[in-house]
Amino acid sequence: MRQTAIFVDAGYLFAAGSALITGSKKSRSSCQLDVKKALNALITKAKGVEPDARVLRTYWYDGIKPYTGPTAAQTALGEEPYVKLRLGMLNSQGQQKGVDSLIVTDLIELARNQAIHDALILAGDEDIRVGVQVAQSFGVRVHLLGVVPTRGNVSPHLRQEMDSLSEFDNADIGSFLKCEVEAQPAIEPNLAGNSAAKQSDTADNTSNRSTSDQTLSAIVRSILTRFDTTQIEQFQTALATTGSLPREVDAPILGTAREKFGRDLTSEEKREARKIAREKLN
C-alpha cells in the first residue's frame, strides 16, 4: 500500500499564515489554531498529491524554550491520533533551533525504510533541502505545501527541489487559524497618568492598588475571551497538573498589563494577575 507522510513546520505555518490572513506576522499569543481542522486540511492536501495513498501520520515540528516543557496546546496536539510531535528549541529571540534537522532526519529515515512513497512538507527553510534530495534518491516523491504567497515566504532553492507545489490560500488558513490584534482593555482614567507620579503619592497607595487590581482583572478577562472552550479546558488541565499558568495565558496577560501601566509590573502585581487568572480558569 502506498503511504504519504505529512511534515509541518509550525513556526512557518504560524508566521506565514498570520501574515496572510491579517496582513502582518502576529505573535503566537494572539493566534489560535483549531487543531482538528488544521489536521483535516493537511490530510486533504495529502490526498490531493496521491489520492490512492494512505496517510501514514502527520509529523508536527515546533520549538520550546530551554528548560521548559511543551505548552498546553502542544501537549494536546501531540495527543491527537496519527500525530507525532517533535520539539526543537527556541532561542532568546523566539527563533526555532534544531527543527529543520528533525524534519530532515524523519524524512530520510522513512524514505530509507521504504515506509512512504510520498511526502508532503509544509515548510519554507532551505535547510531541509538536503533531506528532500536524499529522500528522492530512495524513490520518494516530495511535495511542497506552501502558504500564499509561496514565492515570498519559501526559499526558491527549496521550491525548485520539490516534485510538486500546492498552496494554502486565505480561505484555507482562515478555516483553522484565527489571529487578532492584541486586545486593548479599557483603562480606568486614573491609571492613564504618569506611573512615577502615582508611586510618589503614598497617600493614594491603597486606592491605586485597588484600581490596579480592577484593571488586572479586566485584562485577564480580555485575554481569556480570545480562547475557545477546548483551549480553556486544555489550560485548566495544564493548571491542575503543573500548578502553573500555561505560557499561552501568562505571557499575553503580563505583556498587556505592562503596556497599560507603562512600566514593568512589580512582583506583587504579577502575583495578583496570576492569582486572578487561576481563579477565573478554575
Image: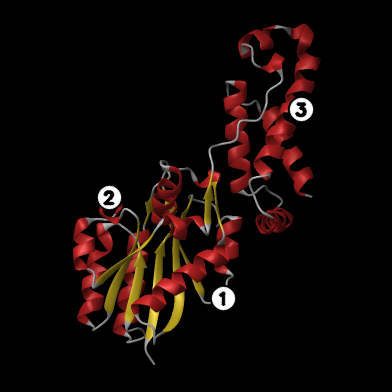
Label 3 vs 1, first from the N-terminus: 1
Few, some or many C-alpha atoms within 10 Å of disc 2 (few <14, some 14-19, many ≥20)?
Answer: few
Q: Position of residue 154 (x, y in %)?
A: 28, 55
Which residue is tagged 3? 214
Label 1 vs 2, first from the N-terminus: 1
Q: Position of residue 31 (x, y in %)?
A: 53, 48
Which residue is tagged 1? 81
Q: Is residue 105 visible?
A: yes
Query: Residue, x 58% and y 58% (percent of image)?
Result: 73
In-image side of 20 versus 104 (left or right): right
C-alpha separation, residue under disc 3 versus residue under disc 2: 45 Å
What's under tag 2, amino acid-wise? Answer: Gly
C-alpha separation, residue under disc 3 versus residue under disc 1: 42 Å
Which residue is tagged 2? 152
What's under tag 1, amino acid-wise? Answer: Pro
Near-viewer residue (62 or 54): 54
C-alpha separation, residue under disc 1 versus residue under disc 2: 33 Å
Label 3 vs 2, first from the N-terminus: 2
